[in-house]
Amino acid sequence: MKVWTPSRGSQLVLIRSKGARMAGICRMFQWFQGHTQPKVHPGRKSRLVTKDGRCNIEFGNREAGKHLAYLVDMWTTFVEIRWRFVLLLFVASFIGSWFIFSLLWYWIARSNGDMSAPRRSNHSMCIANVNSLTTAFLYSLETQTTIGYGGRAPTGRCAGTVALIILQSMAGVFINSFMCGVILAKISLPKRRAKTVSFSDAAVICLKNGKLCLQIRVANLRKTLLIGSQIYGKLLKTTTTADGETLILDQLDIHFTVDAGKDNLFFICPLTLYHVIERASPFYEISADTLPHQDFELVVFLDGTAESTSSVCQVRTSYTPQEMQWGHSFLPIISRTKTGKYRVDFSNFSKSVRVATPHCARCFEGKAAAELQLRDQHKKDNRVNQHKIGIHNLAFQGADVHDAADVTKM
């Protein structure tokens, strides 16, 4: 008896074919990921976070086995893919299951001799009126969708038909539940709620309450609130450490606040967020002239819980130095109508006007310090003058009193 043993050449062919299959799977996942990532237009500077909140990042040179993690986490993969693939999966799952079970029904009918039943007498048919692959497909469709026209039906004389009906019914319930869950999950994704939260197209830098501030405007386009809203930012830029190490996309915290605080915002009307540019701020060394030449990206995050669905959502956007206007202030957009209602004019949501603004935070701080020193000097001079002319009554003046002769007579 001869036993075939693969030669070295055949082993190489097997290895190459297996490697080709893995490479094909890798290319498929790379193509799939390319359809889920935002497009970068040529000629534009790349940014990590787009204006609509999508992350512009690509993972490369990963091991082929890592792509199987998408199949292990199958539910998240199906929820995150685009609608065109969901609809394709919907159609393919149902039609595919109908066709697979139609082959099984056709095999049962053919093995039992139901195809030639009209020519034979005293024949016990397993399925009535199933005499071709087309009628078997129609019977499979009617069974799984519980249509039941009545023309084709099992006779109950074959045990295999009963077992196959149970199996197909359970498979149909599983497919229906899975696809309904995927569609419902995609419809109710929290990021859909984030589409109704809008940020201003540009950020402005101007004075607010005597301080130089970076301001951003955000609006909730729905009347339902975002409960527990929190706002924060990250400044992304390339830095070099003291050891000479270059850090790409180094993250620095940017603290934003509003007049009512930074936590648990009453987010019913548009809010203006501001970041105070002080010594601890990354914008402290930037001036009006150097701002357009900077290389950084400011990412702003808004976290909150939707009032109607209780789902946690995050809204994010980004600003580049070219999208920051030094010496501008936002136009007012909230007014009160004659009927007593508050009106929001979104036509001025991103519009700004030029206002008087210091050239840089350092020079503004130096000017403020000089004014404060001058004010303190004036206060000190006033205290000295008040000591000379009297403290409690400024109109009272002191005069020198000389000893007079005693003119008292007894």
Image (spheres, grey):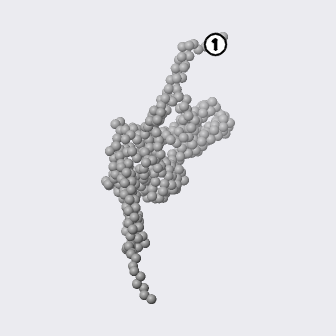
Extreme residue in the bottom direction:
410
Could you tell whether 78 is left or right of 279 in the image?
Answer: right
Residue 410 visible in image: yes
The foreground one among 409 and 10 is: 409
The foreground one among 139 and 380 is: 380
Could you tell whether 255 is left or right of 181 in the image?
Answer: left
The foreground one among 116 and 350 is: 350
- Residue 81 at x, y percent in the picture: 49, 40
The foreground one among 108 and 101 is: 101
Instruction: Identify the residue at horizontal 60%, vertical 40% (top origin).
Output: 171
- Residue 268 at x, y percent in the picture: 46, 59
Residue 223 visible in image: no
Q: Tell me the SS state at disc 1.
A: loop
Dot 1: within a 10 Å radius of its alpha carbon, few (fewer than 14), some, or many (20 or more) residues? few
Q: Amino acid at mark 1?
A: Val
Instruction: Identify the residue at horizontal 39%, vertical 38% (top origin).
Output: 46
- Residue 2 at x, y percent in the picture: 64, 11
Q: Quadrant of the N terminus?
A: top right
Q: Quadrant of the C terminus?
A: bottom left
- Residue 95 at x, y percent in the picture: 53, 38
What residue does disc 1 label? 3
Total marks placed: 1
Instruction: Identify the residue at horizontal 45%, vertical 58% (top origin).
Output: 259
Extreme residue in the top direction:
1
Instruction: Identify the residue at horizontal 37%, vertical 54% (top origin).
Output: 370
